Image: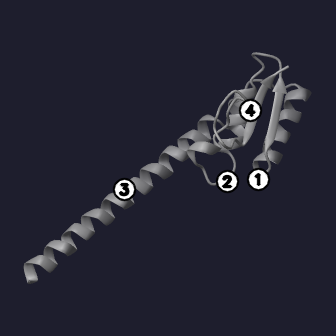
Amino acid sequence: MASLIAQAVKLRRAAQEEQDRLEEENKRLREELRSRFRPANIIGNSHEMQIVYDQIAQVAKTTTTALIEGETGTGKELVAHAIHYNSDRPTSRSSRPTAPRSRRASSRASCSAT
């Protein structure tokens, strides 16, 4: 009986260590994404771009849905990722920024070319 209890304790400890390791890895990877998609990585320092950076910071603080419009090649997806990865919203597969043609049930930001 004692050996069964010891084995159960050992398995529980190993499972907890694995969960702790995975949580740390998840935290590290989220920080990498946050760093990769920070607004400072978007090129531009004109007055108009400063307005965009301010808007990214403003929207990232909220839980609102954002519609990002602009011509093809203007960086709409970069802005969407910057908003998403710099927010404190819970992340899930269905809450990543997506284009309108996506069939995902939920999106935090929709990008469309105009």
- Residue under label 3: 21
Q: Residue furthest bottom?
A: 1
Q: Nearer the viewer, mark 1 or mark 4?
A: 1
Res 89 label: 2
Q: Earlier in the sequence, mark 2 or mark 1?
A: 1
> CB of mark 3 within 8 Å of CB of mark 1?
no
Task: Work out whether residue 62 or residue 44 is closer to the camera in this orientation and state it.
Answer: 62
- Mark 2–mark 3 distance (CA, rounded to whole Å): 23 Å
Residues packed near mark 2 inside 10 Å, few (<14), some (14 to 19) or many (20 plus): some
Residues packed near mark 3 inside 10 Å, few (<14), some (14 to 19) or many (20 plus): few
Quarter of the figure with residue 77: top right
Q: Earlier in the sequence, mark 4 or mark 3?
A: 3
Q: Please tell me which residue is depicted at 11% across the width and 77% down the height of the picture.
A: 4
- Mark 1–mark 4 distance (CA, rounded to whole Å): 16 Å
Q: Please tell me which residue is depicted at 68% across the width and 44% down the height of the picture.
A: 106
Residue 14, horizontal then vertical, whole percent: 25, 64
Q: Is residue 91 above or below residue 38?
A: below
Q: Earlier in the sequence, mark 2 or mark 3?
A: 3
Q: Secondary structure at mark 4?
A: helix
Residues packed near mark 4 inside 10 Å, few (<14), some (14 to 19) or many (20 plus): many
Inspect the image, locate mark 2, and give the three-letter code of the amino acid beneath it: Arg
- Residue under label 4: 79
- Mark 3–mark 1 distance (CA, rounded to whole Å): 29 Å
Inspect the image, locate mark 1, and give the three-letter code of the amino acid beneath it: Thr
> CB of mark 2 within 8 Å of CB of mark 1?
yes
Inspect the image, locate mark 4, and give the three-letter code of the amino acid beneath it: Val
- Residue under label 1: 63
Q: Secondary structure at mark 2?
A: loop
Inspect the image, locate mark 3, and give the three-letter code of the amino acid beneath it: Arg
